[in-house]
Amino acid sequence: MAITWTDDNHNISRHQNIGINDDEEDILGCCIVIIGGKSHYKSLIPAILSQDGFSNIHFIDAGPTLLQKTLELMPDMIILNMLMSQGDGLEICAALRDIDHFRNIAIIAHTPEYSPDDRARIYDAGATDIFPEPVSGREVRNRVHMYLKYRQGVRGLKEYHERLARDLDIARSMQEAILPPVSRLDQISQSHGLEIASQYEASEELGGDFWGIDVLDADRLFIYVIDFSGHGLSASLNVFRLHSLMWNDQNSDFDRITSPASYLEKLNRALFKLLPLEQYATMLCGIIDVKKNIFTYAAAASTAPVKLSPRSRDVISLDPSGFPLGMIGDATYDDREIAFARGEMLFFYSDALIESLDQEGRMIGESHFREICRTSNADSAKGQSFLETFMKNFNGHVTRPLCDDLTAITITRP
């Protein structure tokens, strides 16, 4: 059966045919592969496309090397003649779709078949569209441009997501870099007679968690645990904002901190001026005094740290109440004290340990969290690491991936 075409615009320039502008010129360089067909067919579709300025057009005959040759060209579109002298058009179409590169590009079947069942079989084989018989020059132009624009849009979106993923990885690495390194924790542990363990897991999105611990003097340490609202770039940028504020303080009067509450008030005033509306941070900071056996702390709507002892099954929760940072410019905070003697441990953590979902889709919650602490503490009394045991028990209850950053720190006085 002969394949014919009509072109009622053959005397119109390519820019007038479809009204393309300069921004669409790059479409004309897309690679188009035409598979199968007799000699008169090989001049049919190309004649229409060449009139529009397409020049990257390739012909491949059916045969054992068809798939390899097509893959080598990495086309942006395939036009498949269903009336080829060799091979089965349906089988070739299905075979093309089995190759990763061809799963998301347009494969347009050129066929004279009019039967709905025949057309259905062509679509079932993987064809994106069909050029009917007789083929119209205007229809060829419009459909080719439409699918190539879509192809470029998908490619641009993929490149954007890949670039965004790389940027997020960089931001995540930068955020992890401001956390205390293990070597620093080892130094502090030795200088102040403590055992410090920590675990940080970034979520798939960027989060707003970070923490730190610094030496005030030979007897005192300053610890802080922070979680910004939200996820993504805004939360991550806020982390760097606050870290810069705190770093400036460390270079000035950080070693003269005597009141965690006053320090929170100072940070709150600064963040109130910096943060957009509805963004805020929760924070707990405190001073560990190993000489006086006291932990003095202040909280800004943080999670409630717990104190544990291997000699007791009690899980003592600290008071986390206080206004979030950045919400009320003149907010005030209170200093609170709790005994922190030898043999006791403080456990600081982010809300991922409470708000993550268990395997039945329910939030872990405070009571379940405390029970995991109690069980893990009993195991640690047998010589096992509390944090390792806790994370093992925690992972046995939750579903992953976690929806938020996970921060967990234990400070033990042996």
Image: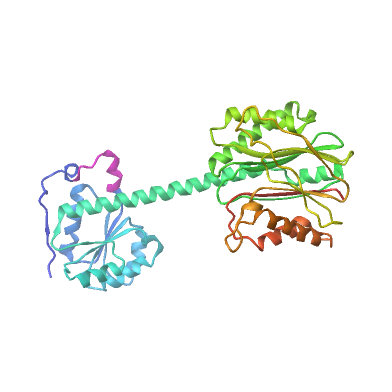
Which is the main secondary structure of the residues drawn in magenta?
A: helix
Where residue 107 appears, as percent x and y from the top left, is: 29, 61
Out of 355 and 235, give the one closest to the viewer.
355
* Left or right, residue 38 beside residue 338: left
Residue at x-position 58% and y-position 41%: 229
Vertical position of residue 188 compared to residue 74: above or below: above
Residue 223 highlighted magenta (yes or no): no
> In this orientation, does residue 242 appear?
yes
Quadrant location of residue 168?
Answer: top right
State yes or no: residue 22 in magenta. Answer: yes
Residue at 17% in and 64% down: 39
* Residue at (87% x, 36% y) in the render: 218
Q: Magenta region: which residues?
A: 18-28
Is 180 positioned to the left or the right of 29 in the image?
Answer: right
Q: Locate residue 40 relative to residue 331 in the image: left or right.
A: left
Q: Position of residue 62 (x, y in %)?
A: 27, 69
Residue at figure coordinates x 73%, y 28% from the top left: 251
Residue 153 at x, y = what percent?
Answer: 35, 48
